[in-house]
Amino acid sequence: MDDEMPKLDKLIGHRPLGRILRKDGIAAEFALIRQAFKIEKNKIPDEAAFQQVGMACGTHFLKLVTPRCEIGQHLVRIQLAKNNLQPTLWPSIDAKMAPVAKLIFRPLEVVGHATRSLVDHLLNPDDLSPLVTKGFAESFGDDALDALGKALTTPLAEITSLPAAEFPIIFVPRPGGGDLQVTPIAPAEAYVRFREVTEPYFRKQENGALPVPRGRWHRQHVTLHPQNISTAIGPKRTRFLASMPRVLDLISAELHRYASGGRFPIWRDESVAKAVEDYTNLLDRNADYSNADIRAGLDRRADQLIAAARNFIDETLVDYEREHSGLEQSKKPSITHVILDRAWPKDGRDRARRVLTGDHFKGRLAAAREH
């Protein structure tokens, strides 16, 4: 064998191979693949082979639920209603036909064009598709191209039986009465694309390179014959451990809200409402009759409220700095706002607002700021 001749497994596959092509090199690449089949397999795939693989392509594989699905009852094609494009298909074929499947599903990396396979070009053509299909036909024949195209678009046989032990069954009420039996299955694309999503987490960290993302991931071999399910799905299954974020306690939740620009945490000391009520009653009494003892009592009650509110604000900001270090604070609340921003009994808020915005309390606030 010519040393320059790539082996077949270097020319076909379900993932990009890094073989960058120009448009005028597409036909030559298919010719190279044909030559590799002839040398290594001593057989070039014919029209029947491409038809067989095309008819074994679908959007959902029942074999992903159980290997006991019968051939012909093991996959479906579901057309999404959101667009007019043909759905993305994947093969579910006997392992002996794997090379043919990997040929038609190989992503072709063409300069200036999206990376797409022959199947993609047949199902949803673009401006490059005529060159791709012509290049394939030049090596494998027009009959093979036609057979593959028809097989990919021919409706599959309906699923009429399931191995009931492995399939979950849900009964959904029909609008007109009775039940509809539903069996949920995952799209094959979810299994294929999940590997693409997780691949960066398993890369080795190179010196001087950007940090590689990490996570609590685990890969496990689940079958020695993965291609009996699909050539696009490997023998490994990837699992990851996801933990729920901790449930915030009330204070932590309010601090998080404050950090996001929301209101300052509420002062929930139950004695505050009673202290404001006592201050209000004494202030009303002072309006009718005043002496030195009453005035001193008013000052003392107001000062105690102010000191307690200030202490609450300071302690809250210490907690804020601990949980949200380095994050700029929202606007610091006033003492009056902190006292008022709470649950009050009927008419209690109006009475509290009257005295906390009155001249006496404002005077005590000014005196407190001077100390």
Image (cartoon, rainbow, N blue to C red):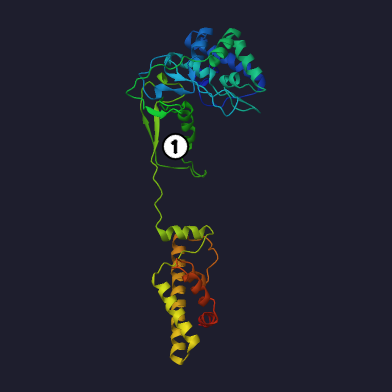
Q: Is residue 24 left or right of residue 344?
A: right
Occupied quadrant, residue 65: top left
- Between 287 and 267, the residue placed more toward the observer is 287
Specify the farthest residue to the left: 165
Q: Which residue is mark 1?
A: 202
Q: Is residue 125 visible?
A: yes
Please, what secondary structure does the residue beneath circle 1 have?
helix
The percent position of residue 337, horizontal first and vertical second, equals 51, 70
Tag 1: amino acid: Phe
Considering depth in this image, is 99 or 232 the residue closer to the camera? 232
| Residue at x 44%, y 57% (from the top left corner) | 253
Q: Is residue 370 above or below residue 206?
A: below
Other residues around mark 1 within 10 Å, as few (<14) / some (14–19) / many (≥20): some
Q: Nearer the viewer, residue 173 or 159?
A: 173
Question: Residue shown at 34%/24% (left/top)?
Answer: 166
Q: Is residue 1 visible?
A: no
Residue situated in front as seen by the camera: 187 or 35: 187
Residue 300 x/y as whole percent:
44, 84
Whether residue 117 is situated above or below residue 344 in the rendered picture:
above
Q: In the image, is 170 to the left or to the right of 353?
A: left
